Amino acid sequence: MITAVVGRTFLNAYNEKYGTQHSPKSFFEKEYWPSFYNHSKYSQWVTNSPFVQMKAGQKPHMLNDEERLEKLAVLHEKVRNEVPDASFALGFPASETKEFATTSGLVSDISLLTNSDDVYLSWIGSGLGIGVAGGFSILFDHPLITLKTYEGWKIYRKYLNDPTLEKLKGNQINTWNGQWLTFALNPDIFRENFDFSLLERTGMFKVEKTLVEVNTVNWSALFFSLSQQFPESEIVGYVYGFGKTNKTIGFIPFQFKSGTRLKDVYRQLFGGKYSDPKQFESLFGMHIKRAGELGSIGLLALRPESLVKYMYGGKRLTLRSDDDINNYKAYKTWLIAMLSKNKEEVKDYTMKMAKILLDYRNGSKGKSRITLVDKNLFDTKSKKDFLEHLTTIVSDASADQLEEIKQLKNEIHLMTNEEFVYFSTLLKFDYTYLQRKSN
């Protein structure tokens, strides 16, 4: 099972880094269980596992040291004597002899050899799952990612044990992993001397009168942080959800070079870095389930979710506030990245053409040109109709506008339908931007 595979990758990397010789069982006993379960607040809740099966009158937060050791002993006994199932081997099939229940994920009816090491490794691997918004987690079978995730375990445990944070919710280790990696791997937002208050200001926690809990991070924010560490890499992740019913998207390549590409395009278009990296990066990314359906997670999956209504819904962009301008910059960055995927140089061609169309629109009295450009041209959804309106504009354009508009017509003629949607949307955005600046 993938949890055991990732657990093994981590344990090998851990033993090498720290000069230890832990077996899966010894690591579980000396590192995992003490951090996750030997406390009044658990880090992780595994349904039907020995750690949550209570005797009459028992409650997890009221267990004493001896009772917690009893729970550990029950797990060891199950590992020794029972066929592994999902109640004590995480990611394994539920206990069914003839068919797999909906609580099983990524399982097979082929008989697979497993041993006690695999069971303990499955716990370790499950604790390395990276929770993201949408009810899914991601496992990367990568030593550096797993080691950095492990570093965050101790911090989460420190906060759970802090008496001043008694309202902090437990059992959120996977959600915490997502926030921790996003913060720790992104030099634009990471600070060495961080504390709880800093993490709260970054949006990692939701603090209310009766409850403090870890917010779930958007997968795109995690993606950008990982792209800082692996700027030219593609790493396969397993995207899944464990719960009452398990969900499996599968093994998906994450093209972290796409995050690098977006930042390069932004720099070429607008110069320097964006003022608020966290806010800007949060604009990107469709739902994780939809992203996974694409087969790989790269530029296309990073499409800003709010962009769709302007591309296909006919909604007009407004630029009345700073947030509107930030959205415009994010949309433009993604659209140009898609239009220039195989080109190192980014050309701001649409801005130039928007200026020509705006000059044409304002170049005569009456409303005929306003209607032709603002309504007929930019309201059309087909390449054919767009070209017909350009033909009308060409017949009436001035000499210095004529060649540029004819060239635009030729460029659009050669575009695929998908490229046309990107291009026309971007042209409309730049036109609106220039129109706003001229008012």
Image: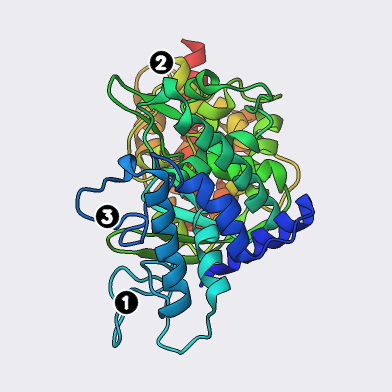
The tag earlier along the polypeptide, 1 or 3, is: 3
Q: Quick one: label 1, few (<14), some, or many (20+) residues within 10 Å?
A: some
Q: Which mark is residue 95?
A: 1
Of residues 57 and 87, the one drawn nearer to the viewer in this rendering: 57
Give above or below for 437 relative to 71. above
At a point 51% along the width and 18% down the height, the residue shown is 197
Q: Earlier in the sequence, mark 2 or mark 1?
A: 1
| 268 to the left or right of 158 | right
Amino acid under label 1? Ser
Which residue is outermost to the left? 56
Q: Residue at x 60, y 46 (%)?
A: 149
Tag in front: 1 or 3: 3
State which mark lies toward you, 2 or 1.
1
Rendered location of residue 61, percent (x, y): 33, 40
Residue type beneath disc 3: Met
Callout 2 crowding tier (Cα within 10 Å): few <14, some 14–19, many ≥20: few
- Kindly tell me whether residue 277 is visible in this rendering: yes
* Circle 3 SS class: loop
Instruction: Name the image quarter holding residue 205.
Output: top left
Residue type of the residue flagged with mark 2: Arg
